[in-house]
Image (spheres, rainbow, N blue to C red):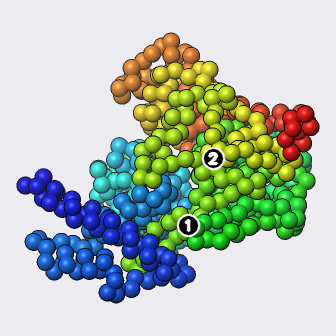
Amino acid sequence: MDYNKKNRFMPLIMAVCVVVGIIIGTFYANHFSGNRLNIINNGSSRLSNLLHIIDDQYVDSVNINDLVEKAIPQILAELDPHSVYISAKDVETANNDLKSSFSGIGIEFVIRQDTIQVQNVIKNGPAERAGLLAGDKIVAIDGKPFVGQQVTTEESTHRLMGPKGTKVRVGVMRFGDKSVKDFTITRDYIQTKSITATYMLNDSIGYMRIKSFGEATYTEMLASLAQLNSEGMKGLVIDLRDNGGGYLQAAVNMANEFLPKNRLIVYTQGRKSPRTDYTSDGRGNFQNLPLVVLINEGSASSSEIFSGAMQDNDRATIVGRRSFGKGLVQQQIGFPDGSMIRLTVARYYTPSGRCIQKPYQPGDDADYEADLLNRYQHGEYFSQDSIKQTGPAYHTSLGRVVFGGGGIMPDVFVPEDTTNFTSYYKQAMMSGLMLQYAFIYTDANRPKLNEYTEMKPLANYLKQQGLVDKFVDYADQNGLKRRNLMVMKSRSLLEQFLDSRIIYNILDEQAWNEFVNADDPTIQAALRVFQTGNFPKRPAASNGRK
């Protein structure tokens, strides 16, 4: 019965998909005002006519809203990989990552064994004021049990966030206690940071990790630069690895700080979007500071705008691996019911004129999403010779050749280090067992670990605890068979990962960054750039290119 019913509805859904696509295009072109879509019903609106006919004459009752809700994502998927529909209930969550604050209780959490486990309590936040501690397990919300399959990241976020001043009651299981403790928390604004680490790599080189490009990124960057300047910074490493992007304007403002006047930073252009140039105004305070930018396959969008501007203007040395390749600009367009679409309206181009969007076939999201895996399998992460960019050649301001059509190529390639990589380590990572064990160990030893307030003393303590052997025993009891020779080969990787996650659990993300960067080959390559003066130079005349 269900099978026949599904088949009976399929032509209807496909018809609505086609018609809604036509109507969205028409409305966007003719009825766009500000960032709202005003849907006007008239005699030529085939969508309105179709929906009216279905509602009036179809053999069974049909929820028209549900029909349209299912059709819109399918239509947008036929355009490009980054045009998406966001339902009204998901809009706030989708926007929070780019905001400098949101209203909630002030915790970082993970889901372990179908339970919310508090990983970190934000200092001076509502949860800390109410008495919550890292390691607490939230098992009830507003008097009702909240465990089991219903516990997802999305549902947990939905229940814990809310307007400022509202209250939420959580039931907590604390390590060593058998009873549930109740805490009433008054939600408040929580400040979020897009710059998660700022410190000196050595006596003269500063370091800044930018996790995303949000509302406050530029302001945070100025504060970080001021801090590093006061500590004797003579050169700067900006780490954009695994930064998926965000606001274009944030990247433009950042680039402006490092460029002389009247340098093109980026321009955007689309079929209905006239070319818009973003240029530097010459007011930046760090126009002559030696600069290295770190990127990898996870650096996308605004990360590529910034690194592309630095590369094309010969302002910085780019170190790492080829970036993701997202060169499409999305416009958020809201519907009256609170839902919205992010519609691609333009492409962005680096100063040399290259669009770095990697190739895609409309409607074929599977191949697009598999691109990073394909790069890995083709050896791109390990050998620069394996990288194939098919786009046209362009030239930087000094005449260096750069390519479009698939991300930003670094000036200094750093392969992924697989020296001690084994299938055992891969399984330990992919299974989540290492993350789980790091949290269990942290929770069981929190009183002792809390005695350490700095990264280096805590790291030295952890190295004496035999964590790898303890983890191997734990993993063996939880389905990952012991492989002694592989464990021996991967011991340094296993130890580093376990130590880093425990450091993150006890201290913060900056401490985690400092720990993992200490032996990072990409950081070492960046420091060699400063030591050797390997910054952009005009190529020799013999290459015949200008």
Give the residue drawn at x 63%, y 35%.
Answer: 388
Q: Percent from the top left, x then y, of residue 466?
A: 55, 23
Q: Percent from the top left, x then y, of residue 256?
A: 80, 62
Q: Residue furthest front?
A: 544
Left or right: residue 82 compared with residue 78: right
**Above or below, 492 relative to 522:** above
Identity, as a three-letter code, of the amino acid under mark 1: Val
Q: Nearer the viewer, residue 233 or 33?
A: 33
Q: Secondary structure at mark 1?
A: strand
Q: Quadrant of the N terminus?
A: bottom left
How many dots with numbers?
2
Pointer 1 residue: 345
Q: Percent from the top left, x then y, of residue 513?
A: 67, 42
Give the residue drawn at x 62%, y 45%.
Answer: 406
**What distance separates the C-alpha of mark 2 from that of mark 1?**
18 Å
**Above or below, 479 relative to 238:** above
**Above or below, 181 relative to 240:** below
Q: Nearer the viewer, residue 72 or 438?
A: 72
Q: Nearer the viewer, residue 246 or 151?
A: 246
Q: Percent from the top left, x then y, of residue 28?
A: 48, 75
Identity, as a three-letter code, of the amino acid under mark 2: Gly
Q: Is residue 277 visible?
A: yes
Q: Quadrant of the C terminus?
A: top right
Q: Secondary structure at mark 2?
A: loop
Pointer 2 residue: 405
Q: Nearer the viewer, residue 328 or 239?
A: 328
Q: Residue furthest left?
A: 1
Q: Badge 2, how many Cα within 10 Å: few under 14, some, many 20+?
A: some
Q: Residue furthest top?
A: 485
Quarter of the view holding residue 503 = top right
Give the residue drawn at x 88%, y 64%.
Answer: 261
